[in-house]
Each structure stands twice: as structure tokens, then as C-alpha cells.
Image (tube, rainbow, N blue to C red):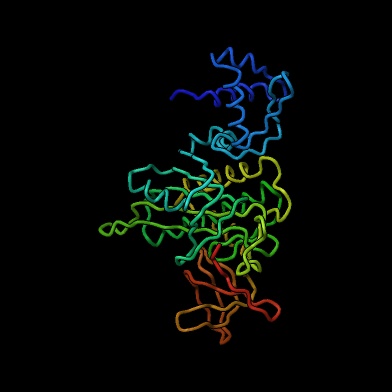
């Protein structure tokens, strides 16, 4: 595929990062006018690249670029793009990354296809709920074609929880915890949710494909959180601006961590991290059922990722999935997977 002028200009500026590149030299090399060079530079600036210029002194690419693009994520992943079989695309806006990739999967898109959006207009949460997806977030989905049974498919979500938690800690240094089943918390606030959807082959009782969707709040949205989730929703950096390049680094690390673990299945060594970082352990919870709720104490998770609980009558059980509420200091905080 022929490179566009702006892509060639970006590559030239990257090669000379920290040094000025003459607009006249770029125009001569590309066989275009200086006005066309200027328009290409403006297009790159619109994408988020910081390109400084002064008079006729040429253009210089700021080494502290905050740009979040396909190229910036791929650059961080490096050779892992090919090694892990990643086909990556970053877009500004989409209705739902899960929906978009579901259609791609039905048309035969390969495993390892990754779509990342900076904003979703119709994000999806568990049980058909809306997933609040404002700007200043990372919304990504993967296409997987695993050779797993329906029961084993639960590990696809568990891997995501571990990958996101570990990535946030390694990139930002912040202590992140997992709230069973699939929410990530930082400083007592939910900063990430995960939704796995699958299409099954009825005859073989196995998956045709799965879509793993991950939403991460990087900074607080403009205007704050909606009233219905402001008590539980948070972000990695809060009201502070995101450090340069952090969104690309977090995205790349989540992708790398996820596919590193996924490629090693059925090895389940990742379950230790899943259990070690559970924030419900030892806390009073309410197990929500169709016929009501019952209080219990969370004991942690077992090797299959089930939540172990002890009811007040002394009986114990393991929960495969469900909604729980955490009871702290006489108040009840519902686990609302709505953003």
C-alpha cells in the first residue's frame, strides 16, 4: 500500500526527533508544494502529534508526544505484534468495539484482531447494561478463536482481569485490585470493566469465536461522572492530566499481557495473580439471586476463579458468576457494571 504524504512526513520527523526538518526539503523530496506539506503537518497535529514550527525554520517533532494512534501502540509492542499475531487498529470513535469486532469475526477476521477506540457512543456492559464510555478512556476488544469448551471460556475474562490489573500497576505504579468477577479498582473506585461475548457451535459444544471487551478510565471525564455512578466510578489518574504517552503504553501492555497468557493456555498459572489481588476477600457481601439476596463473607477465589463464600449459618459454597454488593461500615455499595 502506498504511503500517504503525511505518513512519510511523520516518518521523516521521527527519524529527526529533536531536530528541525525543512519544509522546503520535505516538499522537494515528495514532489509536492510547501502548502501541501503544511496541510499534511496540520493533519498530523489534528491526530494529536505535537509538531512545532517557527517561521521558516522548519518542523520539529516534540519528543514528549501524547499521541495515541495505531502507530504509537505498535511501536511500543515492537516485534510482539508479529510474535503474538496482533492485527491492531486505533480509532477515535465507534459505537461499540465489541459490536464492531463481532461483525468482523462473522466475516472471518482472524484471531488477534484488536480494535481500540478513544470513545464509544454505545458501549456495552454486563446483562445488557450501558457502559459509560467518555473521552479520556481506552476501550478495546479482541477477537479470539480458542479451542475451549463453554465452561473453559470463563478463563478468557479472568485473563483480561489479570492483564489489566498487572498492566496498570507496571505502567503507572498504582496498586490495582480485582473485584470478582471482572472489575478493576484503584483507590477504592472502579476504573475498568470487562465484557466477554461468544458465539457457540452447538454441535461441538465449543466456541466459534469470542470477543473480549475491556474499558479503562484513564482520567476523569469533562464535567465529572454521571450522578448514578459517581460514587463507584473512578479513573487511573483522576482529575490530573494523563502523562505523555500513557494511553498508548497502557494499551500496549494490556495487549501484550493478555496474549502472552492466552497463548499459554491451558496453563493456568495466571490464576494465582487473580486470587492474590481479590479485593473482596474477608469482606461482608450480599449474594444477589433472583429470589433475593443473602449475606455472606467472601473467602477468596479457588483455582477455577469461583468466589468462595461462607454464609452466616456456617455453610460454604463457590459462586461461578453473579452480582455481589460489598457491605462496608454499615453501608452497601452495589457492584453496578454500568460504565
* Coordinates of residue 230 in the picture (x, y in percent): 65, 66
Quadrant position of residue 233 = bottom right
Depth check, front residue: 264 or 335: 335
* Coordinates of residue 73 in the picture (x, y in percent): 57, 38
For image coordinates 49% across by 39% down, the residue present is: 88
For image coordinates 53% across by 78% down, the residue present is: 287
Depth check, front residue: 32 or 59: 32
Judge left or right: residue 333 versus residue 266.
right
* Coordinates of residue 165 in the picture (x, y in percent): 61, 54
Q: Is residue 56 above or below residue 289?
A: above
Q: Is residue 325 above or below residue 142?
A: below
Q: Residue furthest bottom?
A: 313
Q: Residue furthest front?
A: 35
Quadrant position of residue 56 = top right
Q: Quadrant of the C terminus?
A: bottom right
Judge left or right: residue 46 versus residue 105.
right
For image coordinates 64% across by 23% down, the residue present is: 13
Number of numbered discs present? 0
* Coordinates of residue 306 in the picture (x, y in percent): 50, 67
Judge left or right: residue 150 versus residue 236.
left
Q: Is residue 336 above or below residue 289?
A: above
Quadrant position of residue 203 = bottom left
Depth check, front residue: 107 or 118: 118
Amino acid at each position: 500500500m502506498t504511503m500517504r504524504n503525511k505518513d512519510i512526513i511523520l516518518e521523516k520527523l521521527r527519524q529527526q526527533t529533536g531536530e528541525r526538518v525543512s519544509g522546503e526539503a520535505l516538499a522537494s523530496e515528495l514532489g509536492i508544494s510547501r502548502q501541501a506539506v503544511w496541510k499534511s503537518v496540520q493533519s498530523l497535529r489534528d491526530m494529536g502529534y505535537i509538531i512545532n514550527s517557527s517561521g521558516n525554520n522548519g518542523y520539529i517533532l516534540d519528543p514528549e508526544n501524547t499521541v495515541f494512534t495505531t502507530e504509537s501502540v505498535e511501536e511500543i509492542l515492537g516485534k510482539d505484534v508479529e510474535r503474538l499475531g496482533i492485527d491492531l487498529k486505533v480509532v477515535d470513535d465507534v459505537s461499540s468495539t465489541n459490536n464492531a469486532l463481532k461483525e468482523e469475526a462473522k466475516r472471518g477476521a482472524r484471531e488477534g484482531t484488536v480494535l481500540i477506540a478513544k470513545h464509544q457512543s454505545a458501549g456495552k456492559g454486563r446483562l445488557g447494561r450501558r457502559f459509560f464510555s467518555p473521552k479520556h478512556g481506552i476501550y478495546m476488544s479482541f477477537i479470539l478463536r480458542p479451542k475451549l469448551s463453554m465452561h473453559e471460556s470463563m478463563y478468557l475474562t479472568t485473563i483480561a482481569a489479570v492483564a489489566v490489573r498487572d498492566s496498570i500497576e507496571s505502567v503507572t505504579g498504582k496498586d490495582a485490585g480485582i473485584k470478582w468477577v471482572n472489575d478493576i479498582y484503584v483507590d477504592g473506585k472502579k476504573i475498568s470493566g470487562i465484557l466477554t461475548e461468544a458465539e457457540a457451535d452447538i454441535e461441538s459444544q465449543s466456541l466459534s469465536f469470542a470477543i473480549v471487551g475491556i474499558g479503562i478510565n484513564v482520567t476523569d471525564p469533562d464535567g465529572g461522572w454521571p450522578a448514578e455512578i459517581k460514587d463507584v466510578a473512578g479513573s487511573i489518574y483522576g482529575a490530573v492530566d494523563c502523562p505523555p504517552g500513557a494511553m498508548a503504553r497502557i494499551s500496549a501492555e494490556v495487549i501484550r499481557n493478555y496474549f502472552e497468557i492466552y497463548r499459554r493456555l491451558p496453563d493456568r498459572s495466571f490464576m494465582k495473580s487473580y486470587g492474590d489481588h481479590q479485593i473482596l476477600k474477608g469482606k461482608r457481601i450480599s449474594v444477589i439471586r433472583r429470589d433475593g439476596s443473602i449475606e455472606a463473607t467472601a473467602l477468596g477465589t479457588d483455582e477455577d476463579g469461583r468466589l468462595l463464600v461462607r454464609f452466616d449459618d456456617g455453610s460454604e459454597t463457590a459462586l461461578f458468576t453473579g452480582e455481589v454488593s460489598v457491605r462496608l461500615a454499615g453501608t452497601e455499595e452495589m457492584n453496578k457494571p454500568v460504565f
